[in-house]
Image: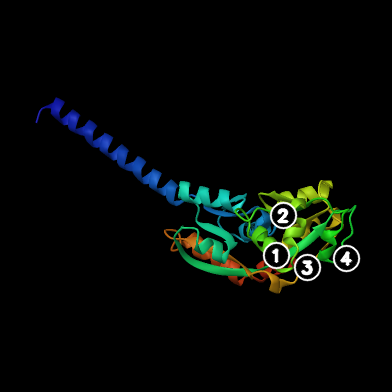
Amino acid sequence: MNHTTSTMKGVRMSRWFFALILLIVFQSSVLAEPLTLAAGAGYKRPLADIIQQYEASGGDKINQIYGNMGQVMMQAKGSGTIALIVGESTFLKSSGLQFASFHDLGAGVLVLAFSKETKLQTPEDLLKPEITRVALPDEKYAVYGKAAKAFLRNAKMFEKIEKKLLFLKAVPQVSAYLISGEVEAGFINLTDALYVKDKIGGYLTPDRSMYQPIKIVVGALKGYEEKPETKKFLSFVTTDPRVKEILKKSGL
């Protein structure tokens, strides 16, 4: 073997070795990517608190995405990078996404909130002429919109106030309209109501038998359920007493 051939083989071996190292580094970086959790915007505050507690106690970093559930589903289907989704059980199961498991967080509660310039004694007060705008999340994007419509129909009020209804995309938007006084009343979840209670006039809790139970879960998507980071986070969420306290304070 002459010197030139030996040198060329050495170059090829070096290139192959360098490519192998790059591949190992790339695969390691992919495997080390933080988990991504997505959820409806109405649960941002308690979930952010839970994740802060998790990371502070030595847990891996968790990326967070919040929006209306329509946006969350589109991103989960389009990106393939979301590992965990928090939402209403029936909605997640019928989303078309492949979930490996579901873990209970609590029961969602619908409330009828009102602005500081308004005072409601009962839900029937929505029929009064001085109540001109009532906001609720669109049922295509938030389960609380579906629950609100079911309640209004079962209470024989929907047709009577239909012209007053303003449909928004997410629970926090309804809360924002209540805080600004752009609407006199609005349907949101108890979680959001508790966080904005000092900025609104108050809230009522409609009869829970007049809409379908709202079961809030965290779902682990297939392909992520066996990752150690996923198992560690789910164990924390389902067993740590701090999580239970946060959920309780958040009305779940």
Q: Which residue is mark 4?
A: 121
User: Given contact means CB atoms under 8 Å apart, are the residues at marks 2 and 4 in contact?
Assistant: no
Q: Which residue is mark 1?
A: 153
Q: Nearer the viewer, residue 200 or 248?
A: 200
- Looking at the rendered image, the disc whose residue lies closer to the viewer, 3 or 1, is 1
User: Given contact means CB atoms under 8 Å apart, are the residues at marks 3 and 1 in contact?
Assistant: no
Cα–Cα span, label 3 and label 1: 16 Å
Q: Which mark is residue 205?
A: 3
Three-letter amino acid code at the position of disc 1: Arg
Q: Could you tell whether 192 is left or right of 88 in the image?
A: right
Residue under the point 43% across and 63% down: 226
Q: Residues within 10 Å of mark 1 (few under 14, many from 20)?
A: some
Residue furthest to the left? 1
- Looking at the rendered image, the disc whose residue lies closer to the viewer, 4 or 3, is 4
Q: Quadrant of the C terminus?
A: bottom right
Residue under the point 62% across and 50% down: 66
Q: Which residue is mark 2?
A: 136
